């Protein structure tokens, strides 16, 4: 399995590799360490002509010699709207016969493989699912001895490829797989480098060659003085030097003067290189020049059949021209009979020097030939766009088809093709409705591709030009525009737009009023309190019922359930949720597309109410419908609903995957508001899934707060709450307290009621950690009152744990034991396994202190088993700190193990400073917090801690904390 070993000459052939010994040593190390802790990405950067492609070719050659599968692709300058072009080019090298045993995987990546999948590419494929499928495919390919995926000229990559690459950088493919990317640094879009600043990345920045390397490697036969002149003129750039050398030898052979230093420049090319390269074309005949122009313009479609159509040459004449161009090393053969100029710089120069009218002729001929051959619409579209400028129904149909083929997997390309179709469609009254429909479709594509502002502007244009009778376009445009404003954080604008639409004359139809009312109600609780919208929800519900509109009724009920649950109206929320579920469960999936967002709200409402099974069931159904219908903006909300349920029910590995997928989608959509909410939930997942003090959880929470900015809405409060949670588990109770009060105010009344008991518990812990017993008692009392009012098991358990902390601090372990036992029972009653396990682990040492050692040990065993089974790193760390004492030793008096006068042998070898650091680690402080406390640098703390780990023979902070607790 793998790429063909006889790679095309244009990929691995050409000039010899000169110099670059240090870079080659790095690349050899990368190959040697494939699958053994090596980097997952090699990033090669440098100026045009500096040797990036040649170095990449050498890496590919060396990898193949060691039996590694190599896939190599290239992005091209004039094909930036062909989705996944460099990846498709790379997969063209693939011998995928062994993969036929996994037809489902091949089908999943069909948008990239083209016709090589087991079935047709789905027009409704989820682009983020495609990213994960590509990662699985690469992992499978890597099992056969390793895999190198080399992607050249990625500064020209299409947006879909950059998004896929960004996913693969942030989520490295497991196993012996490495991505190698070559690009011009100053031209690279930011999406390519996001998340790439990690230890998993090897960066290689190519600089000009040294004079000795350049002259001895490429021009050893020249007199030293002449070689030095050429090197100075070429500025150490290998492409420029070789071009000067070629010109020098050509002119010397003709008896003319040597090459002179030219003074023009083109873009990022070294001074004079453009003109020098164009000089190579001077000896060509007119026919050869026209053939070369066709190759440059056609790009990936430069195969003899299409070139012949574009030039009008006979097969024999075309063969003669191509032979001459190959002998001059201007054109090189590639895979599938495709021809390419020897360097992208030469293609650019030839393309730009070809007359505009001649380029149009070539594209027109290519479009006709591809249509005759039945090529996909996307391949035809790039040539139609550049050759058809007047109304042509057939060309218009192809552009629309190209847009449909790329809508779900490459929305930026979809928006581009729809824009091209709009330019062809006459701007007349007769075509007005069709134009507005096309604009609405383009706005949807822009919105899911991250172009929210451009989407909003286009929708305003649709709304402004649509007549009152065009409800099929106008109302969807208004609703989508309001949704877009929400994602941009512009809630007042969204509400104003919807209210204005409800007041317009002639007034909207009753069914349109229901659609608008549902969207208007969706502003709560994000930026408007639900009580302010309660009347609007009731009116929408009544209108839907009067119409017999079950979808509208179900949508309004779901919005009501979510709003009431958020406000703490548990009984009302439960009633609305049951009614909504009864309606939605009885409707077929195809009917629910229009109410997918209310379905997400129903899932969250049920999660708030502790109905985890129902919440997950409705989230799963919503995900299936949203993926199929292309409602990408809903996926993060549904994924996070499942992740939230995963936390509560202690299924943390699954929750991590769901949160990671939600983050990918939120970043792709480009909504800061949505991304901040996703990151806050990701932080919550990471806190629960990681060992205490894990830096990634705190980093996610900090990014959530920074992304949210100065906003003070519900999502902002979530971000600050999770920052407090992460800070507390990271050992910084002061920061935790400040963040939690920033989230909800001095009395937490700014937070949703269902969160107040849980966050009050955090404030109790923080207050006791800082010695503020009075504040801890106040927060514990408030938690009890809030939980009692709600009557929900998870919240009651939280309040009981808060009360237990106060009792234990007051020296009453018996009361604390009773309270924690009740907390265990309350958590178990709702199926909240995470909180049940936490309550058990907190109760274990308290039971021992209360004289119930056997029961405490049993509770610890049960809680530890739940934590390990659920992948809850936070609880596993807690279990290490609360591990029951060995029989015959004294029991700790509090839930935090007390110190003993006896020092275990493993601690006796520690220096005073190392012992001090170990004790602070046991308290839960992060390295940064320890550095601040001891007036040290974080690096010094890391050094001390590494010595502590070595001397005590423990590998984790939790293990060290447990050792200190038993000392």
Image (cartoon, rainbow, N blue to C red):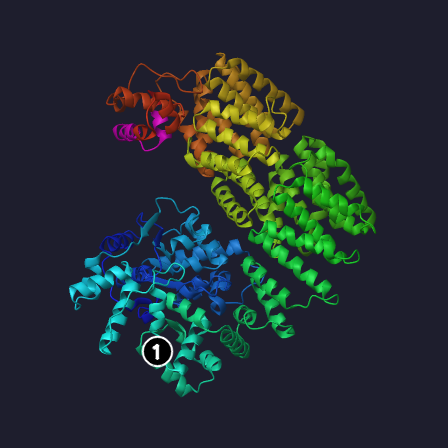
For the point 52% across and 32% down, the residue is: 722
Residue 81, image x and y in percent? 51, 63
Which quadrant of the view contains residue 294? bottom left
Q: Secondary structure at mark 1?
A: helix
Left/right of residue 811 with respect to residue 235 in the rendered view: right
In the image, residue 903 sits, relative to residue 269, either above or below, namely: above
Q: Residue 949: within the magenta?
A: yes
Callout count: 1
Q: State which region is magenta.
A: 943-963
Is residue 553 visible in this depiction of the protein?
no
In the rendered image, which quarter contains the C terminus?
Answer: top left
Which quadrant of the view contains residue 674? top right
Query: Residue reaching furthest top?
Result: 811
In the image, residue 870 sits, relative to residue 229, either above or below, namely: above
Which quadrant of the view contains residue 720? top right
Is residue 498 visible in this depiction of the protein?
yes
Residue 702, image x and y in percent? 48, 34
Residues 207 and 54: in front is 207
In the rendered image, which quarter contains the N terminus?
Answer: bottom left
In the image, residue 753 sits, relative to residue 66, either above or below, namely: above
In the image, residue 799 sits, relative to residue 712, either above or below, namely: above
For the point 37% across and 80% down, the residue is: 322
Residues 238 and 498: in front is 238
Q: Residue 137: within the magenta?
A: no
Left/right of residue 59 with respect to residue 699 in the rendered view: left
The residue at which mark 1 appears reads as: 325
Residue 464, image x and y in percent? 73, 54
Instruction: Give the dominant element type of the magenta stretch: helix, strand or loop.
Output: helix
């Amino acid at each position: 399995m793998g790429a063909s070993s006889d790679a095309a000459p244009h990929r691995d052939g050409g000039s010899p590799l000169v110099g670059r010994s240090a870079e080659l040593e790095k690349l050899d190390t990368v190959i040697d360490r494939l699958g053994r802790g090596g980097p997952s990405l090699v990033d090669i950067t440098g100026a045009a002509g500096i040797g990036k492609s040649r170095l990449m070719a050498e890496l590919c050659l060396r990898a193949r010699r060691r039996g590694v599968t190599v896939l190599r692709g290239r992005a091209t300058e004039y094909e930036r709207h062909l989705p996944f072009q460099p990846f498709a080019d790379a997969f063209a090298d693939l011998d995928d016969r062994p993969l036929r045993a996994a037809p489902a995987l091949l089908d999943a990546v069909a948008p990239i493989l083209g016709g090589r999948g087991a079935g047709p590419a789905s027009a409704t494929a989820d682009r983020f699912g495609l990213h994960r499928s590509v990662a699985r495919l690469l992992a499978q390919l890597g099992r056969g001895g390793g895999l190198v995926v080399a992607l050249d000229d990625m500064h020209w990559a299409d947006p879909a490829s950059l998004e896929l690459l960004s996913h693969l950088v942030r989520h490295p493919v497991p196993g012996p797989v490495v991505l190698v990317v070559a690009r011009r640094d100053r031209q690279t879009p930011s999406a390519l480098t996001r998340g790439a600043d990690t230890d998993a990345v090897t960066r290689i920045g190519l600089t000009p060659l040294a004079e000795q390397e350049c002259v001895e490697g490429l021009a050893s036969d020249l007199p030293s003085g002449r070689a030095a002149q050429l090197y100075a003129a070429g500025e150490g750039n290998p492409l420029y030097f070789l071009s000067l050398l070629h010109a020098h030898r050509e002119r010397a052979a003709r008896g003319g003067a040597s090459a002179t230093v030219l003074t023009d420049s083109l873009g990022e090319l070294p001074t004079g290189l453009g003109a020098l390269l164009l000089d190579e074309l001077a000896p060509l005949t007119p026919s050869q020049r026209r053939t070369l122009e066709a190759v440059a313009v056609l790009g990936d479609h430069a195969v003899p059949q299409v070139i012949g159509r574009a030039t009008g040459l006979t097969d024999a004449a075309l063969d003669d021209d191509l032979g001459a161009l190959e002998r001059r090393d201007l054109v090189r053969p590639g895979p599938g009979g495709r021809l390419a100029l020897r360097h992208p710089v030469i293609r650019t120069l030839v393309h730009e020097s070809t007359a505009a009218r001649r380029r149009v002729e070539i594209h027109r001929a290519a479009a006709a030939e591809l249509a005759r051959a039945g090529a996909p619409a996307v391949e035809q579209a790039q040539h139609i766009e550049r050759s058809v400028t007047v109304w042509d129904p057939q060309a218009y149909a192809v552009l629309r088809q190209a847009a449909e083929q790329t809508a779900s997997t490459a929305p930026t390309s979809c928006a581009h093709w729809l824009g091209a179709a709009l330019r062809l469609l006459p701007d007349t009254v007769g075509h007005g409705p069709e134009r507005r429909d096309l604009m609405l479709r383009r706005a949807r594509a822009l919105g899911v591709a991250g172009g929210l502002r451009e989407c909003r502007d286009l929708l305003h244009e649709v709304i402004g030009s649509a007549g009152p009778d065009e409800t099929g376009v106008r109302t969807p445009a208004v609703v989508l525009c309001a949704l877009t404003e929400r994602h941009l954080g512009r809630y007042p604008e969204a509400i104003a737009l919807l209210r204005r639409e409800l007041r317009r004359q002639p007034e909207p139809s009753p069914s349109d009023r229901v659609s608008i009312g549902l969207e208007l109600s969706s502003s709560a609780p994000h930026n408007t309190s639900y009580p302010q919208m309660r009347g609007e929800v009731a009116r929408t519900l009544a209108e839907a019922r009067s119409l017999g509109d079950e979808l509208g009724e179900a949508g309004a009920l779901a919005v009501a359930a979510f709003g009431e649950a958020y406000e703490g109206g548990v009984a009302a929320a439960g009633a609305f949720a049951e009614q909504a579920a009864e309606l939605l469960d009885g409707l077929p999936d195809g009917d629910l597309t229009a109410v997918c967002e209310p379905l997400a709200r129903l899932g969250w409402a049920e999660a708030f109410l502790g109905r985890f099974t129902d919440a997950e069931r409705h989230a799963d159904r919503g995900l299936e419908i949203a993926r199929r219908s292309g409602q990408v903006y809903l996926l993060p909300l549904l994924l996070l609903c499942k992740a939230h349920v995963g936390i509560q029910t202690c299924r943390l590995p699954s929750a991590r995957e769901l949160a990671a997928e939600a983050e990918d989608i939120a970043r792709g959509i480009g909504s800061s508001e949505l991304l901040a909410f996703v990151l806050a939930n990701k932080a919550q997942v990471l806190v629960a899934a990681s060992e205490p003090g894990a830096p990634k959880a705190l980093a996610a929470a900090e990014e959530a707060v920074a992304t949210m900015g100065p906003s003070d809405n519900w999502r902002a409060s979530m971000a600050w709450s999770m920052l407090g949670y992460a800070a507390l588990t990271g050992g910084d109770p002061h920061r935790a307290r400040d963040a939690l009060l920033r989230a909800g105010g001095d009395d937490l009344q700014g937070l949703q009621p269902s969160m107040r008991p849980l966050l009050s518990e955090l404030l109790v812990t923080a207050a006791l950690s800082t010695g503020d017993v009075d504040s801890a008692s106040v927060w514990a009392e408030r938690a009890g009152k809030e939980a009692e009012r709600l009557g929900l098991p998870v919240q009651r358990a939280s309040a009981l744990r808060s009360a237990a902390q106060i009792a234990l601090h007051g020296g009453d372990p018996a009361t604390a034991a009773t309270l924690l036992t009740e907390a265990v029972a309350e958590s178990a009653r709702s199926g909240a396994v995470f909180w049940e396990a936490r309550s058990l682990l907190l109760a274990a040492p308290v039971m021992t202190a209360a004289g119930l050692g056997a029961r405490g040990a049993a509770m610890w065993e049960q809680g530890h088993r739940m934590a390990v089974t659920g992948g809850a790193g936070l609880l596993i760390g807690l279990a290490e700190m609360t591990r029951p004492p060995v029989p015959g030793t004294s029991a700790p008096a509090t839930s935090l193990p007390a110190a003993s006068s006896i020092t275990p042998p493993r601690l006796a070898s520690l220096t005073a400073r190392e012992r001090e650091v170990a004790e602070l680690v046991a308290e839960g402080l992060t390295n940064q917090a320890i550095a601040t406390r001891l007036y040290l640098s974080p690096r010094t703390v890391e050094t001390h801690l590494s010595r502590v780990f070595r001397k005590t023979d423990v590998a984790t902070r939790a293990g060290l904390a447990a050792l200190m607790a038993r000392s």
